[in-house]
Image (spheres, rainbow, N blue to C red):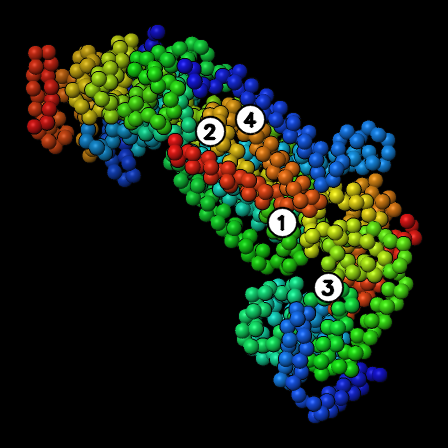
Amino acid sequence: MSVQAISMQLEQVRIAQADRCLIRDLSLHIQPGEVWLVLGENGCGKSTLLSAMAGWHALAAGVVALQGRAWGDWPHGERAKMLAWQTQQDECPFPLTVLEKVLTGRHPHLPRFAWESAADVALAREQLARLDLSLLAGRDLATLSGGERRRVALATALTQDAPLLLLDEPLSQLDLRHQQQALQVLSEEQAKGRAMVMVTHDPNHAHFFAAEHCRVLLLFGDGRWLAGPRAEVLTADHLTALYHHPIVEINTPDRAWFIPR
Amino acid sequence: MNLARLTPQKTLLTLSILLLVLLLSVIISVSVGSTSLRPWQFWYDNAESALARDVVLELRLPRTVSALVVGGLLALAGTLQQVLLRNPLADPYILGTSGGASVGALLALLLGVGTLGVNAAAGTGALLSILIVFLLAGRDRSSTQTRLLLTGVALAAFCGALSSLLLSMAPDGLLRGMVFWLMGDLAGAHWQSGAAVLCILLLLVWPLARELNIMGMSAESAHALGLNHQRLRWVLYFAAALASALAVTTAGMIGFVGLIVPHALRLMIGQDLRLLLPAATLAGGIVLLWADIIARTLIAPQQLPVGVVMALLGVPAFLYLLSRRAVR
Amino acid sequence: MSFKLKLAVMVVTASLATAAVNAAVSVQDDLGVTVTLAKPAARIISLAPHATEDLFAIGAGDLIVGAVNYSDYPAKAKEIERIGGYNGFDLERIRALKPDLIIAWGSGNPQRQLDQIKQLGIPVFTTFSKKMADVPTVLERLGVLTQQTAGAAKAAKNYRDQLARLEKTYSNRAPVRVFYQIWDRPLMTINNTQIISDVMRLCGAVNVFGHLPELTPKVDVEAVLVANPDAIMTSGEPGVKGDVLASWQRWKNLKAAQNKQFYVLPKDIISRMGPRLVDGAQAMCEAVEQVRQVK
């Protein structure tokens, strides 16, 4: 499966929540196959930034463009083929099975009167299998645990098959094995050329992705930000400043680990 | 393995079964009534068969169609309202549409205008309340539609107070007709415009069913999957409001169909609106038809108000479903 | 006798009577409750239009100090102070008028308010006529309470004479089957215990739904078509043509529709159980007689 090469530009973007300015003058260029990790304290604007990149939260200033075309000018249906957005909340008030939920990811690709084809179902089941969810396909979403629901949401985003993924804490609530599994899946997707922006609370997740494609964005919550290649941005000093807590770097033979002191 | 996924085959099968039940119900409905006349008495050529023709074709059949149309409108409105408010227990009357209709109708009854005037006034009242809610709650991006819900509920409460005021000012002779209107009545209802609107609304919203499935999940998901959320929610709101306005205008206030039918059906056939929308419309018609059959035959020739029968049957059924849901 | 002279005579009679017997009076009302007044009533409040008519008919009209809305007959009744509607009245105003007798309406006034009046210690006489013959007895008992026995006797005699004449003329004629519609939406009629059914009996008519258990049953059109009455009657404002009954004309197999036998009887006289009920009966008997002719 080939992935369309797309890029997203943020120019002088300002993100505000009510009167509070969270991010000031943010300019980024997200290239095909890049993984961007977004780190920051609670309430620093990570989710709001993702929401703004998805075109939901209104920008206080600046421009978000895809393929050089302002986001607001994209038709709704086309936008969903380009970008998948996994939010933190995904509670459905109605009874819905796991497979039905994952199949909603095919919606942007289906003509109005078409039903999900066998190929669509196969794609959905493939994503479920990759995230160890096959046995849950017929279960009601409401009966799942929090971690299982996060994985279903990720499977849905993958089924949407968009070249750019916005993932809001896809790994929170996942146990260790499933975290590793999900990271493996994400790095496979990155290898296919999919671009990703991923909010996380664990800086060590960065090391799952090839260094030349991995970028990091630190949000300080007061408008300031720091963005760049992993090696430049992800340092113990920066993280200590970011979290207002001493962070140390510990080197093992194959990689470096950041842990709080 | 392929447990609950909806397929076109399953949709067709379910709708066919419902259509069959509907047909049977219609046959029973035109065959029973407060008198012992039956459709097969048509074929003789005497006074008795002329009477049978009058009773079956002119009285029972229009009443049967009215029940189907009103029940269908209410169940459709309820289904849409539940998706709009992302609340499986929302009711088509919750956003004040019927409250506006009641105030209009009661005012017309108090002024002593005829049946058509009452219908026109109910329709006007409903449209006014729709517009007021639309203007006051125009921009609401919260996922539970809080502002829309609160505006509607507040307007409904205001209309309820106005209705009570009108009832308290009414002389005894008119009071009877006013209270009766509030209880719902299918006798002599004009079903034509309701039927037309029901068909138009179904043709409008059924093709949107897959979109509405996603609308029911969360506002952000809807946006992420490429829906025009603002536009769709107003399509939903106006379709639900129009359906409940037409239902109330046609037959007065009949509660619980719009709440119970979609909810019960959802527990049986799932939430997929590609099936649920048409199925709820058919089932709403069937349920109201049976309530009406009971209302007009139980102590015949005396009549019970159909809205009361509906509530007496519907509330226990609803409470039962609710308690089962709590267990699950 | 001119009105002034009549009034003068009445005043003289009244004062003479007061001088003679200013003693306690006592009667039973229509609910079987004994109403006793230490002295004849002088300040009366009427809680029903028919009660107002009763009092005027026996010559006690000027004792009324308050009346409910629609107390519009005779014309002089319109000048009486209003105390609310018959289904809800102003207790404060009633108390302020210091009445010594209240005439209530058994099937019209709210029981809760009547109980409150009784708690204020004001005597209540409840009227509830179920037969045409009950009406003159009310006149006579009100005559006792107001010491207008002569006027009451006269009014009762007038009523009974007219009633007897109607009974003799019509009650044994060929029966006519009538559907009496008291409301169109919901479609409502009356059973045999309602006083209008007694008027029908008097006129030689039969109420097609007389057997139903409820006083005012709701029925459906289907039941009316099958009952197939000779005529459909209702009450309405005098002069209004059969608009409320127009919807019946579409039923070509209905005898009443085939012969166009729809009658709107004058509302006030047929539906008030007062002294003019016998005039209402006259109107109904004439209508029934017309039906009988075309039948």
Q: Amino acid at mark 4?
A: Pro
Q: Are marks 2 and 1 in contact (CB under 8 Å)?
A: no
Q: Which residue is mark 3?
A: C130
Closer to us: A60 or B286: B286
Give how far across and how far down residue B118 sits, in percent: 65, 47
Direction top: furthest residue: A1
Give the mark nearer the N terminus: 2 vs 4.
2
Q: Residues within 10 Å of mark 3 (few under 14, many from 20)?
A: some
Q: Amino acid at mark 2?
A: Leu
Q: Chain of mark 2?
A: B
Tell me, yes or no, if residue B212 can be seen here: no
The residue at which mark 2 appears reads as B267
Mark 4 surroundings within 10 Å by alpha-carbon count, few (fewer than 14), some (14 through 19), many (20 or more)? many
Question: Are the residues tagged 1 and 3 within 8 Å (C-beta)?
Answer: no
Tell me where residue A79 appears, x and y as whole percent: 39, 20
Measured along the vertical axis of the image, is residue A183 above or below residue B167?
above
Q: Going 26% across and 14% down the picture, which residue do you hit? A: A186
Image quarter of residue B310:
top right
Q: Is residue B82 left or right of residue C250?
A: left
Upstream in sequence: badge 4 or badge 1 = 1
The span from disc 2 to disc 1 (Cα, nearest Å) is: 33 Å
Crowd around label 1: few <14 · some 14–19 · many ≥20 (10 Å): some
A126 to the left or right of C257: left
Would residue B298 be seen by someone viewing this image from the given angle? yes
Mark-to-mark CA distance, 1 and 3:
26 Å
Q: Which residue is mark 1?
A: B180
Q: Secondary structure at mark 2?
A: helix
Dot 3 falls on which chain?
A: C
Q: CA distance from mark 4 to mark 3?
A: 55 Å
